[in-house]
Image (cartoon, coloured by chain):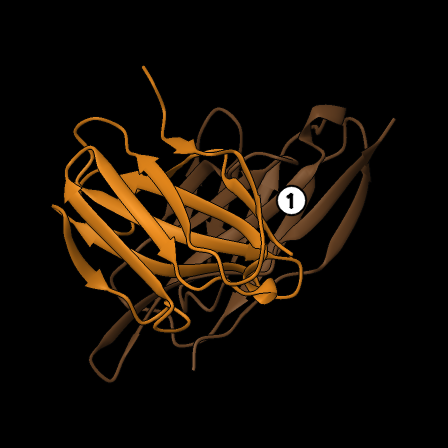
Chain colours: A orange, B brown
């Protein structure tokens, strides 16, 4: 079975540009999570969805960040405009049956903002 | 305020048992504590989950005392391939909010 698929794996862009990260959760999973990982702050939950509806976006750092889940098989995390401090690895994860059920993570998108 | 504390790093020789403890305050009363393993350039991977006392699966055991203010991941007879970062994930609730908070991770180095 396919796991969580994220794209792109790596993204390098200049400050001020729009960045869009994509995620395909495991089929049938009803929860989807976006995380950011940095050396300084570790793994931070940005937002999570249940049945395509955002449940908690309190971890989204600023209005520059937005996330959508138009259907059960696709989600995006967008940063506009991007800043160097947004450089991090962004993970998407999905789970079945609850936000604290075992989460399956993708391999992440390594984002570098120059 | 949710606060989860783990040792930053641990070293162990191959074949030894390794215990990693996570301390957590204000934990939600009716929810699981979960541990994940992460290798470089990969996402975290689920290891084990428990609510109280002891849980064991094919790769690890998880000990949770009655007060649930800590949890200990036990890896029996570690091998070089167990070198990774280990995270606890703890649910917190209070003032109408629910938070899942990862610890900062424990980097385990297994020495031949």
Q: Nearer the viewer, residue B2 or A19?
A: A19
> In which quadrant is the C terminus of chain A drawn?
bottom right
Query: Which residue sits furthest top?
Result: A1
Q: Is residue A104 toward the left or the right of residue B97 in the image?
A: right
| As drawn, A79 above or below B76 | below
Q: Residues within 10 Å of mark 1 (few under 14, many from 20)?
A: many
Q: Nearer the viewer, residue A25 or B48?
A: A25
Q: Position of residue B73 (x, y in %)?
A: 56, 46
Which residue in the structure is indicated by mark 1? B85
Q: Position of residue B88 (x, y in %)?
A: 50, 53
Given the image, what chain letter belongs to the residue carrying mark 1?
A: B
> In which quadrant is the N terminus of chain A drawn?
top left
Residue that appears at 28% across and 55% down: A67
Residue that appears at 48% across and 24% down: B58
Q: Position of residue A87 (x, y in %)?
A: 59, 57
Q: Nearer the viewer, residue A84 or A35?
A: A84
Q: Secondary structure at mark 1?
A: strand
């Amino acid at each position: 079975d396919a796991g969580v698929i994220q794209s792109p794996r790596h993204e390098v862009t200049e400050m001020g540009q729009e960045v869009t990260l994509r995620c395909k959760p495991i089929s049938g999973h009803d929860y989807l999570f976006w995380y950011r990982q940095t050396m300084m702050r570790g793994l931070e939950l940005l937002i999570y969805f249940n049945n395509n509806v955002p449940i908690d976006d309190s971890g989204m750092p600023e209005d520059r960040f937005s996330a959508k889940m138009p259907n059960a098989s696709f989600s995006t995390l967008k940063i506009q405009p991007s800043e160097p401090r947004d450089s991090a690895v962004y993970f998407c994860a999905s789970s079945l049956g609850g936000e604290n059920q075992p989460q399956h993570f993708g391999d992440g998108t390594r984002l570098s903002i120059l | 305020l949710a606060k989860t504390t783990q040792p930053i790093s641990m070293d162990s020789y191959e074949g030894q048992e390794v215990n990693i403890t996570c301390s957590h305050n204000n934990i939600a009363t009716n929810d699981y504590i979960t541990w994940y393993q992460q290798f470089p350039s990969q996402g975290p991977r689920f290891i084990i989950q428990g609510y109280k006392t002891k849980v064991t699966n094919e790769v690890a055991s998880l000990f949770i005392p009655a007060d649930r203010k800590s949890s200990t991941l036990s890896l029996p007879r570690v091998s070089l391939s167990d070198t990774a970062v280990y995270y606890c994930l703890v649910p917190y609730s209070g003032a109408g909010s629910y938070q899942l908070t990862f610890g900062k991770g424990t980097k385990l180095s297994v020495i031949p």
